[in-house]
């Protein structure tokens, strides 16, 4: 049954991709197809990486209500954009070369994530509660610093920061994709290969260690994968905090099983499907340009509240 649902989801994703590329296609077809293919690739890899990263984070944390964005990646991204505009000005920020800016942002996000994981998990992977709480506090602190710095900006510079702080799939460069796609594809493959160990990790630290799993090493390695996946995705298009939570919750409801060999592809596929179909509807059918990220965050927030209320009711 789960395999059939995965095949059905893959078929829906293929149809969504075809519609996104070919709907209302006009001359010059080659140029338009090139632009659409670049945006489609960004939608696919960001959706897949975000969905899979959320499943991984929920597994190692032992909690189905959290997402990697809760650790503060989105707040750090906004802080970086604000500091760049404050230091360089609006014109200087706009003149930054695309590739170096992408690499710097990715390195900063991944480095900060690994530093946070390394500092807080030195005593072992059992201290994940401290990691989550510290991430929340870090996010609040960075948002406060960003808000203070934004008050020092000119109105035109503030508008630049606001535009850069929201996820945008229309400004992705193909050079960025040539770097991001292999990195995220490799991370997804490694995560899927770890599926049997992740299934053991679901039993809890003590039981997993009893069964021969090096739990602490697995958790640190998975957190490294999560840091890279979230860093690359965020640097590529911007923060989409609740997309992963939405994809992971739908994958669990669709499959009704927790084995990662099926759950990871399902969450990755649903994350990509949400972005592709959502962008197609808003851009091709409704004629909107920048509302998808807001709608995804809204729906993800509703899913989060529903999960919390259901857990509380129990």
Image (cartoon, rainbow, N blue to C red):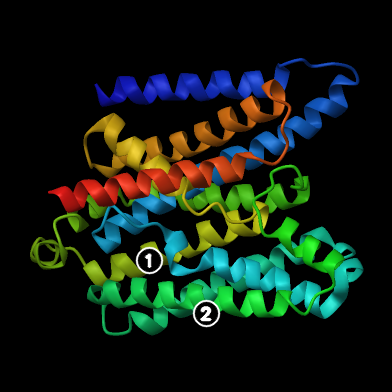
Q: Is 210 on the left-hand or right-hand side of 174? A: left
Residue at image x 90%, y 64%? 95
Give coordinates of residue 85: x percent, y percent: 79, 72
Give coordinates of residue 296: x percent, y percent: 52, 42
Most foreground residue, 210 or 113: 113
Q: How many tags in the picture?
A: 2
Q: Quadrant of residue 67?
A: bottom left
Which quadrant of the figure contains the N terminus?
Answer: top left
Image height check: is 196 above or below 218?
A: above
Give coordinates of residue 12: x percent, y percent: 49, 20
Q: Is 308 on the left-hand or right-hand side of 304? A: left
Residue 262 numbered tag: none
Q: Is 110 on the left-hand or right-hand side of 125? A: right
**Residue that mark 1 sits on:** 221
Most foreground residue, 271 or 121: 271
Q: Quadrant of residue 126?
A: bottom left
Residue at image x 36%, y 81%? 120
Residue at image x 74%, y 56%? 163
State how far apart marks 1 and 2 are (Cα): 27 Å
**Residue that mark 2 sits on:** 141
Q: Is 179 on the left-hand or right-hand side of 89? A: left
Give coordinates of residue 149: x percent, y percent: 70, 79
C-beta proximity under 8 Å, tags 1 and 2: no
Instruction: Say which element carries label 1.
Output: helix
Most foreground residue, 21 or 143: 143
Image height check: is 162 above or below 254?
A: below
Instruction: Say which element carries label 2.
Output: helix
């Amino acid at each position: 049954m789960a395999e059939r649902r995965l095949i059905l989801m893959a078929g829906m994703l293929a149809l969504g991709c075809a519609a996104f590329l070919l709907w209302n296609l006009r001359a010059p077809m080659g140029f338009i197809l090139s632009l659409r293919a670049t945006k489609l690739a960004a939608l696919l890899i960001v959706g897949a990486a975000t969905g899979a990263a959320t499943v991984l984070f929920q597994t190692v944390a032992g909690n189905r209500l959290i997402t990697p964005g809760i650790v503060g990646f989105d707040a750090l991204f906004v802080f970086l954009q604000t500091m760049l505009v404050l230091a360089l000005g609006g014109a200087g920020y706009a003149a930054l070369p695309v590739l170096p800016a992408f690499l710097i942002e990715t390195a900063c996000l991944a480095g900060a994530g690994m530093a946070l994981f390394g500092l807080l998990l030195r005593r072992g992977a059992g201290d994940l509660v401290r990691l989550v709480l510290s991430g929340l506090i870090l996010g609040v602190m960075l948002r406060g610093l960003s808000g203070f710095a934004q008050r020092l900006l000119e109105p035109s510079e503030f508008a630049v920061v606001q535009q850069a702080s929201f996820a945008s799939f229309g400004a992705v460069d193909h050079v960025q994709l040539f770097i991001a796609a292999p990195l995220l594809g490799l991370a997804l493959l490694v995560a899927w290969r770890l599926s049997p160990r992740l299934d053991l990790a679901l039993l809890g630290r003590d039981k997993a260690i009893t069964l021969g799993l090096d739990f602490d090493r697995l958790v640190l390695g998975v957190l490294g994968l999560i840091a890279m996946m979230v860093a690359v995705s965020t640097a590529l298009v911007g923060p989409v905090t609740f997309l992963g939570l939405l994809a992971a919750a739908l994958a669990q409801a669709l499959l009704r099983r927790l084995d990662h060999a099926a759950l990871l592809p399902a969450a990755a596929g649903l994350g990509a499907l949400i972005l592709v179909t959502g962008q197609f509807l808003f851009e091709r059918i409704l004629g909107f340009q920048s509302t998808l990220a807001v709608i995804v965050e809204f729906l993800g927030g509703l899913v989060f509240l529903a999960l919390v209320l259901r857990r509380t009711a129990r």
